[in-house]
Amino acid sequence: MTTQTAPSTYAPTSTATATGVGSLFSYWRSNVELWLALITLVALLAGWWGGSVTERLPAWVATMLAVIAYAAGGYSGLMGAIEEAKRGKLDIDFLMITAALGAALIGEWKEGALLLFLFTLSGALETFAMERTRKAIQSLAVLRPETARVRVGDAEIQRPIDDVQVGDVVLVLPGERLPVDGRVLRGDSTLDQSSITGESVPVFKQVGDAVFAGTINGAGVLEVETTKLAAESTLSKIINLVEEARQDATPTQRFIDRFSGPYTYAVIGATLLAIAIPQLFSHESFGDTLYRAMTLLVVASPCALIISTPASVLSAIAAAARGGVLFKGGAYMEKLAMVNIFAFDKTGTLTSGHLEVTDLRPLNQYSESELLRLAASAELRSEHHVGRAIVARARAAGLDPETPDDFRAIPGHGIQAAFQRENHRETLYIGNDKLFMSEEMDLSPAIRMIGEALQRKGKTAMLVVRRSTVEDTLGADRDWEVVGFIAVADSLRPEAVTAVQELRQQGVNHVVMITGDNKNVAENIGRAVGVDQIHSDLLPEQKVEIVQDLVAKGKVAMVGDGVNDAPALATAHVGVAMGAAGTDVALETADVVLMASDLSKLPFAMKLSRRAGEIVKQNVVISVGVILTLVTLTVIVPLFAPTFRLPLPLGVVGHEGSTLVVVLNGLRMLALRPPRR
């Protein structure tokens, strides 16, 4: 039985890999260990029956049975010990093999065979138990079909999923899983996205909507234009992230791993002393001394301690992924459990992020349609929520925005877009007051009052300014003109208030909102959610400064959309990204990802993290407690009761039993599910 810190038998390159080589290896490994344990048991029982019951067992038969029992029972441990020895290390397998050989040396081969039988059986059962966690994670891989039905002209061709290219049109029939990430070209249907986002209710999709590989089509027929290669799909990235998370040990696990090496050598040293001291200072027989030393070697082994953390953390990561929450590593799960301060971005986090244009206030004889067309043209290349809302409103009004020749976002202020005309260059500016305070213009109090009135209503007001630059022999002549105000508004996420309340119930004592939006809008949302502190009108670097101040006061989690909030996410102890389905930046910048942009999953993630931490502590107490108890019975008690001797089989049962207890205790995490709303 080789205890692994972060077991991995799967590389997420294809469905065949996930369900083939990895699963086959695990299947044969666990079954081979079971067969070896059975052979050991049969040889052991035959030797016991023939030698102790009938007392007619020939010596050569007894020897043969001993060899069979030791060969079968010691095979897995010996292979593991040899592999570690090649790396210059001694591990638990070495301790168990040494103890069994020691028992044979003093003529107690049956007890040594019993040790090997229980050791091999425990390894098989441990492998079986941990395989449940692996399968819970690997089940993600089988969500993606191996082939796709690609439309080529009027024909339909089945292609391997890895051969589907960006731009290919894939036909998806009712009840089928989508093979690719893409957008709907034709048709509409409801999709079960629970495998990607954790959403329990199917989502309606129509022309233009984004769809994801691994989701299940409802009753409609869809034609989907592929937007990502199979290896770059959201599902593939989720699988890769979960696999990487399995490899990332928690601080507790790293400490145990560092401790286990020296501890193993300490056990070997204590065993040698347990042999030498009685022989030098007492009249105890060598057989009794060696028997006690071999028992000590078994009961002091840290097998249960080493497996205690990964058994819990891997189960928790699998349960979280199944519930639509991705942890990038066990370390972040441990950190989230200690968080007592939450900082939330506003737009796209506490609010839905689906902004709508609410007011058009043209000035200087511009019409509403002119204001909207100019603003949409300037925002056409923008990825910001505000820009997308303006463009969507313009297109809904039948306007055709013009593509700018040059576009630049000004973080915390707004945007500027340039258009080259025949005899001049035209630049459009859209932004808040801070943008125009830094420019060469002076807004009149009357104009500023319009923006302030909109902001007092809880709306985000932006001024649109037009500037023409004409080059002549005398230099550049600039002509500034105010086009008007555009206001947008966002709605509070329905689950935001409940999520914040549940976080407080879990021990979070300070909730902060940090946003680049204006004070009035921020205060309206902040009061509705019930945050303790509101910071508004912030630039990205100012968000970082506030998070740094919070970090000095406690353990901080920053929750944002993973795009504009990347610096703040990186500054906090734990960065949590919203809406990772289809958002590459969120997957790359955050430590924890809420796939469905559902804040109700945040308390679930906290509960999962803290529960995992509790179970790790339980497992450590159990494993250390069993070791101390068995070592006391082996070494300390005989000092006061010389006739007492802990039987080696009882020590083996205690040692292997504690290992199975901590593994099964950790597997309880798989039963946790997010609440249904």
Image (cartoon, helix red, strand yellow):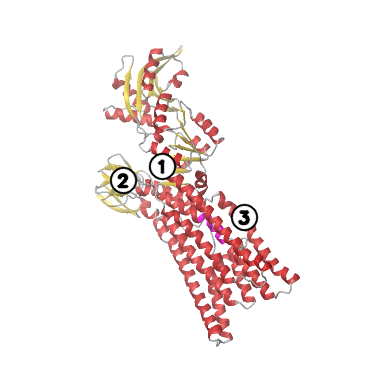
Count of numbered badges drawn on the protein? 3
Relative to the observer, which residue lies in front, 588 or 576? 576
Question: Which residue was labeled with disc 3?
Answer: 259
Percent across and percent down for residue 500 are 42, 37
Residue 228 higher or lower than 41, as above or below: above
Q: Earlier in the sequence, mark 2 or mark 3?
A: 2
Mark 2 and mark 1: span between their CA atoms?
Answer: 18 Å
- Amino acid on which the number 2 mark rests in the picture: Val
- In the rendering, at what x and y percent does residue 222 appear? 27, 46
Residue where numbered disc 1 is placed: 580
Q: Contact (CB < 8 A) between labels 1 and 3?
A: no
- Viewer-side residue, 533 vs 344: 533
User: Circle 1 sits in a helix, a strand or a loop, which is it?
Assistant: loop
The answer for how far apart the CA atoms under marks 1 and 3 are is 37 Å
Magenta stretch bounds: 303-310
**Image spot of residue 389 (x, y percent):** 34, 30
The tag earlier along the polypeptide, 2 or 1, is 2
Residue marked by disc 2: 201
Predominant SS of the magenta segment: helix
Please identify, in this view, whether the residue under mark 1 or under mark 3 is nearer the observer: 3
Alpha carbon separation for disc pair 2 and 3? 47 Å
Q: Nearer the viewer, residue 230 or 559?
A: 559
